[in-house]
Image: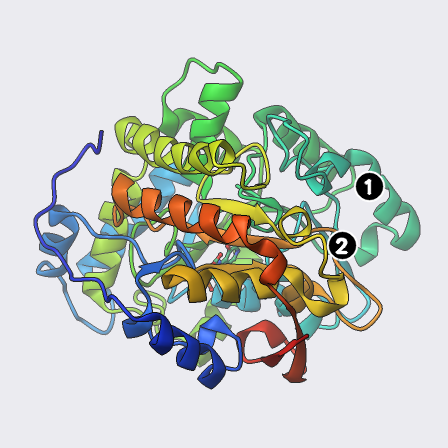
Amino acid sequence: MEPFKIKAVEPIPFVSRAEREAALVEAGYNLFNIPSELITVDLLTDSGTSAMSDRQWAALMMGDESYAGSRNYFRFEQTVQQITGYKHVIPMHQGRVAENLLFSNCVRPGDHVPNNIHFDTTKANVEHNGGVAVDCVIDDAYDPTAEVAFKGNMDLDKLDQVLAKVGRERIPLVLLTITNNSGGGQPVSLDNAEQVSSWCRRHRIPFFYDACRFAENAYFCKMRSGLDEDIPTIARRFFDLADGCTMSAKKDGLVNMGGFVALNDQEMTEKVTNMLILIEGFPTYGGLAGRDLEAMAQGLEEVLDERYLAHRIGQVRDFGQGLCDAGVPILLPVGGHAVYLDARRFLPHIPQELFPAQALTCALYLEGGIRGVEIGGLMFGSAGKWPELELVRLAVPRRVYTKSHLDYVVATSKSLFEKRDSIHGLKITYEAPVLRHFTARLEPVN
Ligand code: F0G
């Protein structure tokens, strides 16, 4: 059961099918363009959508809004240092700023940056600096039916291949995303992180985590590798293997806005801090209010509670199991923060160039006012170059929805699956040059 009770509630919108139909046309068949007031169950993202605890709300009242040296910064700094062990903690307003500031100080044109799988903003920030984002996850990650315990693991042979191709001077850092969001929210094992770490040490290449969901990853390690330690200890064992991390605290920080870079290197800290002052703000607030830092520190402590994690991971697992029992094809095993519908198997009649996962995302909205997000050809493809996976991610916000909301999503997905043949593909009518999925407009193709 939920290890919390509910103190404040927010009504959810119920919208007629005719209204949903009109909203889809208005939105150019892109759910990013639909106002949340027209969404019944919003599973677009687990990012920034968490419900804060009473202690976090109380923390907001403890805000010290001094421009420099706010006491909230020092609590936040100390909390991150305790969790990660990294010396320097630089607050930022969200994860992609952390990526931007770190990469623009180390990635040069032509450099290659390996990761298990880059998240979209991570890839875009590498490319924005002229770099090449290389995904080096194990092959199993691309088989949605392979029930492998640590499907987020890095393939060390693929790292060797990048090294052989470009040499160590052209690899400014290696990233490891825990959990691996774009591959299904799949965990990385401690053994694998150790191997990546020693590979990086051997070749004198900095090693960073994209640590958005580090606590969920640690919980999976405890369960699937049978580790005896508590969650903070397991998380710390991960962090000890690397030189630093980027973090969007909108996930495992349990806040609606916030992020940071934490690292040991003094010189890189100075470079990032100087740019932070230019772009985000003074180093003791970094684009946030003092009260936000206090809530983030509190959230980072709460997220490591094993009871919280058992419910969190269990809720997502049961949601996935419900879909499986209903015969709906999903990516297995179920990940930490989301269930991913497998659009290739859901809609085998729609070819990849007609965006099956995007078509499924729209159909699910039309059927039940449910908003998921496409992770497929619209997000990662380009003419003639298509990603391996066509997924619809149904991300579960933390501490927000109950079992009956997710049961409703299961029932809606089941009825949609039964009439899947009636779903048509889509074609693009407008696209931006980068991160096109956010603003693209599409229309149905018969
Ligand atoms: N890295 C990963 C693995 C992410 O999942 C995200 C965000 C980011 C970096 C960027 O963080 O949004 O704070 O700038 N993921 C969200 C999602 C948006 O829906 O998965 P941000």
Q: Quadrant of the N terminus?
A: top left
The quadrant of the picture occupied by the C terminus is bottom right
Mark sitting earlier along the chain (2/1): 2
Does the rendering let one see residue 106?
no
Whole-Å distance between the Cαs marked 2 and 1? 9 Å
Mark 2 residue's CB less than 8 Å from ligand 1: no
**Are there few (<14), some (14-19), or many (20+) residues within 10 Å of tag 1?**
some
Residue 384: image tag: none
Q: Amino acid at mark 2?
A: Val
Q: Which residue corresponds to mark 2?
A: 134
Looking at the rendered structure, the secondary structure element under dot 1 is: helix
Residue lying furthest right: 165
Q: Assess whether mark 1 and mark 2 are in contact (beta carbons under 8 angstroms).
A: yes
- In the rendered structure, the answer to whether residue 136 lies left or right of residue 124 reads right
Depicted 102 relative to depicted 241: above or below: below
Nearer to me, 95 or 413: 413
Choose between 126 and 185: the one closer to the eye: 185
Residue 244 x %, y %: 53, 47
Q: Is residue 319 above or below residue 424?
A: above
Instruction: From the top left corner, tell me how far across and down residue 337 is, in percent.
Output: 44, 44
In depth, the one of 390 and 15 nearer the eye is: 15
Which of the 4 image quadrants contains residue 260? Answer: bottom left
Q: Which picture quadrant has residue 295?
A: bottom left
Residue depicted at x 36% and y 70%: 17
| In this view, 249 is above or below 83 | below
Label 1 near ligand 1 (CB < 8 Å): no
Q: Which mark is residue 158?
A: 1
Other residues around mark 2 within 10 Å, as few (<14) / some (14–19) / many (≥20)? some
